[in-house]
Amino acid sequence: MREYKVVVLGSGGVGKSALTVQFVTGTFIEKYDPTIEDFYRTEQFASMKGLYIKNGQGFILVYSLVNQQSFQNIKPMRDQIVRVKRYEKVPLILVGNKVDLEPEREVMSSEGRALAQEWGCPFMETSAKSKSMVDELFAEIVRQMNYSFLPEKQDQCCTTCVGQ
């Protein structure tokens, strides 16, 4: 069975763990339990994040659609992925989470769609709570990883071809 290394990035409290747990176990975590970035000093987490990005094959960038700042915070994360991977077309999905909180929305769908279009990646709005689009999200990132051609793979092919 093939292993897929998916990295889920976003600000604290946007629902990264909730989306992942909902996908894997089919349950929703009601209580917010701060995960890894909240337990490390900034410089420690920054180096860990770089390592996750370096080893990741596909990326899910999550913001909360009820938090405009979390949407702004997503842009430097994508920049870091491109910088570390040295490739613009990394398998990536932009996700606006918490669609179940529609009355509290701060980030319009059109803003997410426009950013995804600028980046050349899919855009989805999800809800870990109601399980809306969660399975589709993970299916799509796997589909992208299956069809992506990263420069490392092309270089290996070319090196092999040149050597023959």
Image (cartoon, rainbow, N blue to C red):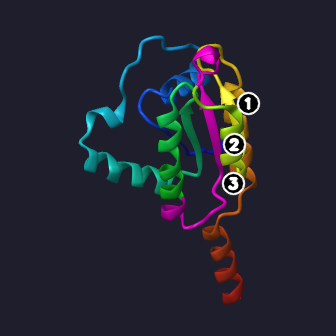
Q: Is 115 above or below relative to 16?
A: below
**Mark 1 residue element:** helix
Numbered mark located on residue 142 in the image: 2
**Which one is closest to the eye, mark 1 or mark 3?**
3
Which residue lies at the image location 49% right of the left edge and 28% below the top edge? 14
> Front-most of 108 and 48?
108
Side of 103 relative to 38 (left or right)? right
> Front-most of 17 and 146?
17
Residue 70 locus on image (x, y percent): 48, 36
- The residue wearing badge 1 is 136
Side of 83 relative to 163 (left or right)? left
The magenta segment: 82-105
Residue 4 locus on image (x, y percent): 60, 44
Numbered mark located on residue 104 in the image: none
Identify which amino acid the numbered label 3 is placed on.
Glu
Dot 2: few (<14), some (14–19), or many (≥20) neighbours within 10 Å? Answer: some
